[in-house]
């Protein structure tokens, strides 16, 4: 049987690059936050002027670890459908609040990879690309799963 | 199971390549940062003990509203609770944004002149307190005169009238800021045991700063 669209060698290679690339970005993002005291990341979150302080502190303490776990799971490829969905949701959330801050002209740091990177059109474009890659990976992971189920059914029929 | 094992192996191999590349890039970047960190203290515009475990540098512009609120809501309690208790050495750095703030350099000149008399803190407080007034008409003199004696004021006016020396100090701070680099005001940089932590612009409040300093002091 010829390989289906989502099982071809090229598709598998693209998915591999996508999930490892995203995983590496998440691991690096986690590393840049965890290597400095958590309050610095809290200040970055606070600069977006969205959340009350207790929530800012909670997210500053939890988010880097979540990024670390998601990054590791993306690289390992375990339960890719769900991990990619969670990654897409997180990246979409980042993208929306970054857009809001940019258009409000807050003049703050992105906070994506530690301090020192201003929120700009470039950082928005980069985040937009990450969102696109993550959404594509999510869709591909679901389609591949569906195809493999169909193949099992047809071979057992 | 074999598929999962293959997934992991592929993932780890590609990641290893990515990590080698990014580690080299990060090394190059951190080297560049270490060479531009501003640490030399300017005693006349500093407050507290030089031997304090933490140094906080603040690049600010007297005419910037964000600098005023940082000074009044964050730096005042910082001075009271950490600088006066010998835990923080606070350094003021001038970074007047002259393209947008017409009287920022003039205010910095008055503050630097007051620093020569050891009255920097008092004058800075007055300048910030009356920022809304002198930002309109440029009458920084009135704000400064409200907290200095006539004799002190006479000296300050003389220095401000011939500002070359004062500008040297201001320009030195601006050059330092350019090396950090300062992209907006206020910008805060905290140094503890040789490690420098630039703080994110616009996100510093006293509560978070206090928690950050406490964590550094516990180390």
Image (tube, coloured by chain):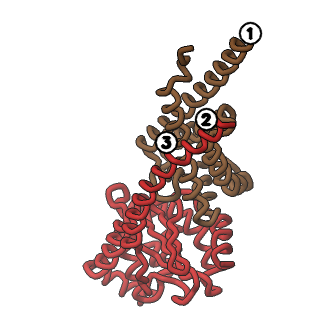
Q: Which residue is mark 2?
A: A88
Q: Is residue A154 left or right of residue B7?
A: right
In the image, residue B117 sits, relative to residue B72, either above or below, namely: below
Q: Name the chain under label 3.
A: A
Q: Name the chain under label 1.
A: A
- Looking at the rendered structure, the secondary structure element under dot 2 is helix
Look at the image and tell me in which quarter the N terminus of chain B lies: top right
In the image, residue A101 sits, relative to residue B77, either above or below, namely: above
Q: Is residue B124 left or right of residue A27?
A: left
Chain A painted colour: brown
- Looking at the rendered structure, the secondary structure element under dot 1 is loop
Q: Residue at x 46, y 88 (%)?
A: B118
**Number of marks drawn:** 3
Measured in 3D between alpha carbons, the distance from the residue under mark 1 to the one under mark 2, in whole angstroms, is: 36 Å
Please state the horizontal and vertical placement of residue B193, each as a whole percent of the image: 54, 81
Location of residue A4 by image quarter: top right
Please identify, in this view, whether the residue under mark 2 or under mark 3 is nearer the observer: 2
Q: Earlier in the sequence, mark 1 or mark 2?
A: 2
Chain B painted colour: red
Please state the horizontal and vertical placement of residue B63, each as a whole percent of the image: 43, 62
Q: Name the chain under label 2.
A: A
Measured in 3D between alpha carbons, the distance from the residue under mark 1 to the one under mark 3, in whole angstroms, is: 56 Å
Please state the horizontal and vertical placement of residue B126, each as a whole percent of the image: 51, 73
Please state the horizontal and vertical placement of residue A38, each as a whole percent of the image: 64, 62
**Residue B138 in view of the camera:** no
Please identify, in this view, whether the residue under mark 1 or under mark 3 is nearer the observer: 1
Q: Which residue is mark 1?
A: A157
């Amino acid at each position: 049987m010829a390989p289906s669209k989502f099982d071809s060698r090229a598709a598998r290679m693209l998915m591999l690059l996508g999930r490892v690339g995203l995983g590496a970005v998440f691991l690096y993002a986690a590393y840049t936050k965890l290597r400095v005291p958590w309050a610095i990341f809290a200040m970055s979150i606070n600069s977006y002027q969205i959340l009350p302080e207790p929530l800012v502190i909670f997210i500053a303490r939890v988010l880097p670890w979540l990024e670390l776990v998601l990054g590791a799971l993306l690289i390992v490829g375990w339960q890719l459908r769900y991990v990619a969905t969670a990654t897409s949701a997180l990246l979409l959330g980042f993208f929306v609040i970054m857009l809001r801050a940019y258009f409000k002209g807050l003049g703050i740091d992105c906070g994506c990879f530690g301090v020192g990177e201003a929120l700009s059109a470039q950082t928005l474009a980069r985040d937009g690309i990450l969102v696109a890659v993550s959404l594509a990976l999510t869709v591909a992971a679901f389609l591949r799963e569906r195809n493999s189920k169909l193949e099992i059914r047809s071979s057992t029929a | 199971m074999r598929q999962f094992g293959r997934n992991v192996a592929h993932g780890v191999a590609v990641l290893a390549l990515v990590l080698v590349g990014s580690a080299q890039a990060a090394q190059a970047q951190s080297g560049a940062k270490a060479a531009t960190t501003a640490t030399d203290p300017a005693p006349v515009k500093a407050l507290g003990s030089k031997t304090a475990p933490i140094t906080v540098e603040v690049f600010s512009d007297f005419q910037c509203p964000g600098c005023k609120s940082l000074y009044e809501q964050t730096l005042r309690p910082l001075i009271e609770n950490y600088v006066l208790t010998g835990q923080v050495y606070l350094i003021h750095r001038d970074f007047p944004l002259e393209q947008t703030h017409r009287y920022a350099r003039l205010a910095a000149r008055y503050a630097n002149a007051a620093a020569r008399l050891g009255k920097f803190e008092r004058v800075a407080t007055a300048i910030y307190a009356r920022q809304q007034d002198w930002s309109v008409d440029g009458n920084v003199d009135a704000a400064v005169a409200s907290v200095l004696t006539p004799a002190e004021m006479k000296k300050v006016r003389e220095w401000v009238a011939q500002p070359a020396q004062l500008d040297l100090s201001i320009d030195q701070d601006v050059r330092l800021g350019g090396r950090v680099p300062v992209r907006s005001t206020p910008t805060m940089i905290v140094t503890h045991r040789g490690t420098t932590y630039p703080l994110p612009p616009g996100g510093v409040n006293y509560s978070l700063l206090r928690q950050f300093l406490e964590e550094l002091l516990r180390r």
